[in-house]
Image (tube, rainbow, N blue to C red):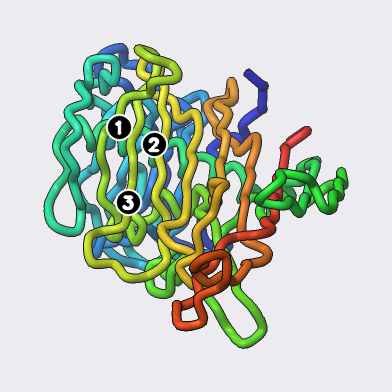
Amino acid sequence: MMALALPLALTLAGTGRAHAQVVHGELVDSGTARPVSAALVEVLSDADSVIARAISDSAGRFSASTGSPGIYHLRVRHIGFRSLQTTARSLGAGEAVEWRVIVNALPTQLAAVEVEGATACPATGPLDQATSDVWSNAVSALLLAVVYREQPGMFVRVRITTRDVSASSGRALSRSEAVREEVASEVFRGPDPDSLARFGYIRTAADGTSYYAPDAAVLSSDSFARTHCFTLVPDRRHKHDGIGLSFTPTPGDSLAGVRGVLWLDRRTSELRSMEFTFTKLPENASSTVSLGGRIDFEHLASGMWLVRHWEFRMPLALARHRAMVNGTADSTAKYYYTVSVFREESVDLLAP
C-alpha cells in the first residue's frame, strides 16, 4: 500500500472567494469518540444535488464552500460503513457554519452478505440492504478516486500503450508505448455521465464511430445508478474473499450501453476492480474477443483511492459477410458483420 500525505481537509469546492459561505466541521466516531479520517463529506442542497466535496483529515476536520446561501445538509461516506446523512441547516450570505457530525452508522459486514442473485433497479425501487451495502462501499471508493485525481496541480507519471490486433489471429498489427507526465485530472477521465445516459456509449457520426468507457465519476453518478440494474454475484476467482456487483442497463434501454461487474473484497469492503463489455456493437457485429475494458483500483495508506491500471478494447475494423450456400455467397442474404481488427489501449500509473 502506497503512502500519500493528505493535506489538511482536502477540499473540492468553489473558488474560495472572500465572503463565501463555508461549512467547517469534524467527524467523530460515536463508539470511540475518536476523529474519523479519510471520510468523504458531501455538501448537498435541499434538492439533494452535490454542491461540494471534502475529505476529512487525520483530526476528522473538513471544510467546503457552497458558493451561495441556502439550505444544506451533509452526506458522509466511509469505506466499511453505511453512508450517513445529517439534518439540514441554513447558511446565510458570507456565513461560516461549524458542523459536528457523530458517525454512528454500523459497519457494513460484506463477509456476511449472501449472494442470492436477485436483481434490483434503483429507477423502479430501492435496493435491498445487502445490495445497497455493496453499492455504497463501491461508490465511496469511486468518489474518493475522483477526489484524488481532481487535486489542483497534481501530476502523475503514466505508461500509455496502444495496440491494433487482428481478431482472428491475435497478432499485433502495430504497437506503440510512451511514458510521460500528465495532469492527474486528465488521466482516466470519461465523458459526462448524463451524456452517456442520454446518447449511449457508442455513437456513430459522419466522421466515424466513437466508443466510450465508464470512469470512476461515471460509475458513481446518479445517472448511472438510475439507468442500470444491479445483482450481487459470487467472485469465483477469489472464492470466499470477494463479492461482485454486476450492472446491466435497465430493461427497455435501446442505446448501446455497458454491462459489467464491480469486484470488492469481502473482508475489507474495498473496491478491487471493475470490468465491462458493450451490450451491442455497430451493425450488430459479432466478436470473438471481449470488447470493453477494465479498471484496477488501489487503496492508499492515507485512505485515498486511485486508478492504478485502465484498459479499453474497441472495434477498429469490421468485415462484411454473406451466408454461404454450396460454397458461394448467397446474394439474396443480408450482410452480417464481424470485428476483424480491434484496438487495445491501456494506461498504467507509474508514480502519483
**Quadrant assignment for the N terminus:** top right
Q: Position of residue 31 (x, y in %)?
A: 25, 14
Q: CA distance from mark 3 to mark 1?
A: 16 Å
Which residue appears at 65% of the width and 34% of the height? Answer: 308
- The secondary structure type at the circle numbered 1 is helix
Q: CA distance from mark 1 to mark 2?
A: 6 Å
Question: Which tag is nearer the camera, tag 3 or tag 2?
Answer: 3
Q: Position of residue 71 (x, y in %)?
A: 26, 61
Crowd rating for badge 2 (residues with CA inside 10 Å; few <14, some 14–19, many 20+): many
Crowd rating for badge 1 (residues with CA inside 10 Å; few <14, some 14–19, many 20+): many
**Amino acid marked by disc 2:** Ala
Q: Residue tagged by mark 3?
A: 248
Q: Residue tagged by mark 1?
A: 134
Q: From the viewer's perspective, tell me whether residue 309 is left or right of residue 145.
A: right
Q: Which image quarter: residue 255?
A: bottom left
Near-viewer residue (39 or 14): 39
Near-viewer residue (93 or 115): 115
Q: On residue 138, which mark appears?
A: 2
